[in-house]
């Protein structure tokens, strides 16, 4: 079974993976250069990193067809480190980032993705789509009409070429767009911005480099805060992107393996003179939409990237940026969840607020981690508030037996504990109290404390209290932490009153 799965990952879609990997390699070049400039390092640092990370994650990552490389989110976290301490400390920080991510993988922190609500995912996707589009605007401002014409022509090729009989399905339209616009630009001799204008491309293969930093505690103090931040942001973006690719391909991925794969990739990048990176949603979408499905597409993207920048840099420098802008605009349009706009009318207000706040925070801070954190926090608060409202108590008084039965329904936890205590009439003077919790569940210490207070207050009023119907999980936590049957602890719970 494992052999069949591995064979499918590598050889199940050879033509599609090679073609899509080629498209991704072309799209990676200007982005890797741009992110290097953001981080304040030489373009080859981002290009070497993109090659290394893509190749290693092709073998060790948990999500086939996902593209990982140098990214803007990671580059923004490196700016201060590079400015204050230089490239060598960045390489050391990249290695430590990888170590932290491998530890996260073994701790199975990838499972925390189950706490990310759908509305947070939608907000994350929409924010990324907007950021991808906004990143193209510098290439479309203060330029001649030729750039707009080329960009429009590129979008026309991307969306119309697939309708051509036979060939339209065989060759990815983004690849046709890049090759076609490059040929037109060269033939007409257009004076427009090209990949060659982005910066000098490396002309040598990467070599093994151990960072030239002192192996001291002081060095660790310098790089650890940056490495921790990069590890968190890198894993967050990678796991979110993996979930998106899962949805696009109707398959599943191993999130813990992805954490480890990203870690080994960043260690490799640091040792080859590259900066830390993570999954790229834009390039991953390009890969899937161009027909990429297996690990081969990620490997091809990494290897072709290196071959092109080292051996074909002269030809590569002729590619007009307008062609790559067209591809990225296609990605932003395809990434944005247009249904989320329509669903604003039908979805619950809380889900809409979570989605909009996630988008707003990401766009405001340009930090995906902040947006997702706020989204998850809001989603959790809304959920806790909603569940608390479903907790109620039925009351039945039997005057013949002087007995009052309280039947508790719903979930008792930190957000409903106070409401639970307020629903009992402590001073009613009835001598026999039955608290039926067969329809309820006690989740945490707040719930146990609330039950303790109710029982103790009734007993102080002279009532006999019986609790019945506890399920196994509730009984376990109440037996362990409850004190209403422990006289020496009662005063602590009631605060001495």
Image (cartoon, rainbow, N blue to C red):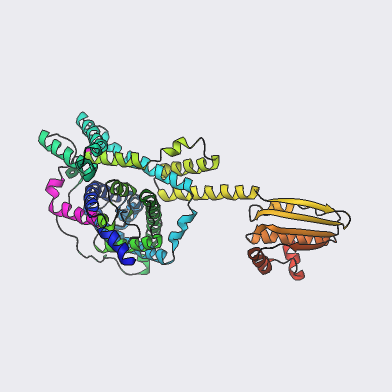
Extreme-top residue of the structure = 145
Extreme-front residue of the structure = 166
206 to 15, vertically: above or below: below
Left or right, 381 with respect to 203, comes to right
Q: Position of residue 206 (x, y in %)?
A: 19, 60
Q: Residue at x 29, y 65 (%)?
A: 213
Write down the region rendered in magenta. 299-322
Left or right, 409 with respect to 324, comes to right
Q: Quadrant of the N terminus?
A: bottom left
Q: Position of residue 344 (x, y in %)?
A: 49, 36
Q: Position of residue 416 (x, y in %)?
A: 66, 52
- 200 and 29: which is toward the camera: 29
Left or right, 439 with respect to 139, comes to right
Query: Can residue 497 be seen in the rendering of this structure?
Result: no
Q: Residue at x 75, y 62 (%)?
A: 467
Q: Residue at x 17, y 59 (%)?
A: 205
Q: Inspect the magenta stretch and tell me whether residue 313 lies in it.
A: yes
Q: Quadrant of the C terminus?
A: bottom right
Q: Inspect the magenta stretch and tell me whether residue 315 lies in it.
A: yes
Figure quadrant of residue 432? bottom right
- 148 and 156: which is toward the camera: 156
Q: Position of residue 176 (x, y in %)?
A: 20, 41
Prevailing SS of the magenta stretch: helix
Query: Can residue 64 be seen in the rendering of this structure?
Result: yes
Figure quadrant of residue 455? bottom right
Q: Residue at x 87, y 57 (%)?
A: 402
């Amino acid at each position: 079974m494992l052999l069949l799965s591995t064979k499918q990952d590598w050889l199940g879609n050879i033509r599609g993976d090679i073609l899509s990997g080629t498209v991704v390699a072309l799209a990676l070049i200007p982005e890797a250069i741009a992110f290097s400039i953001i981080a304040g390092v030489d373009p080859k640092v981002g290009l070497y990193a993109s090659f290394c990370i893509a190749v290693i994650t092709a073998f060790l990552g948990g999500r086939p067809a996902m593209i990982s490389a140098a990214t803007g989110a990671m580059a923004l976290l490196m700016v201060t480190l590079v400015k204050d301490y230089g490239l060598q400390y960045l390489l050391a920080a990249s290695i430590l980032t990888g170590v932290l991510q491998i530890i996260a993988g073994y701790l199975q922190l990838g499972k925390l993705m189950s706490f990310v609500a759908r509305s947070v995912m939608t907000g994350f996707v929409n924010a990324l789509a907007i950021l991808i589009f906004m990143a193209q605007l510098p290439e479309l401002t203060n330029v001649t009409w030729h750039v707009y014409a080329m960009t429009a022509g590129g979008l026309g090729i991307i969306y119309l070429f697939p309708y051509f009989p036979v060939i339209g399905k065989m060759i990815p339209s983004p690849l046709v767009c890049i090759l076609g616009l490059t040929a037109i630009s060269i033939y007409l001799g257009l004076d427009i911005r090209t990949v060659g204008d982005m910066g000098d491309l490396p002309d040598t293969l990467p070599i093994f480099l151990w960072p030239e930093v002192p192996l001291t505690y002081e060095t660790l103090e310098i790089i650890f805060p940056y490495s921790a931040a990069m590890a968190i942001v890198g894993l967050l973006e990678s796991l979110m992107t993996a979930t998106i690719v899962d949805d696009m391909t109707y398959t599943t991925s191993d999130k813990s393996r992805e954490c480890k794969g990203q870690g080994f990739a960043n260690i490799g990048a640091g040792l080859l003179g590259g900066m830390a990176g993570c999954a790229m949603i834009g390039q991953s979408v390009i890969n899937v939409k161009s027909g990429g499905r297996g690990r081969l597409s990620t490997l091809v993207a990494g290897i072709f990237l290196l071959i092109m920048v080292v051996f074909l840099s002269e030809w590569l420098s002729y590619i007009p940026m307008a062609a790559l802008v067209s591809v990225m605009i296609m990605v932003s349009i395809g990434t944005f969840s247009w249904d989320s706009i329509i669903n604003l009318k039908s979805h619950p207000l809380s889900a809409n607020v979570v989605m909009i706040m996630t988008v707003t925070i990401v766009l405001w801070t340009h930090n995906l981690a902040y947006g997702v954190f706020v989204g998850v926090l809001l989603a959790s608060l809304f959920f806790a508030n909603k569940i608390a409202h479903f907790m109620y108590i039925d009351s039945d008084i039997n005057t013949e037996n002087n007995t009052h039965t309280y039947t508790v329904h719903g979930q008792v936890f930190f957000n409903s504990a106070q409401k639970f205590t307020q629903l009992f009439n402590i001073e009613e003077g009835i001598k026999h109290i039955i608290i039926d919790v067969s329809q309820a569940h006690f989740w945490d210490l707040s719930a146990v404390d609330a039950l303790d207070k109710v029982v103790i207050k009734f007993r102080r009023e002279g009532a006999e209290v019986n609790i019945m119907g506890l399920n196994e999980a509730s009984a376990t936590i109440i037996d362990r932490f409850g004190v209403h049957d422990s006289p020496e602890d009662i005063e602590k719970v009631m605060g001495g009153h």
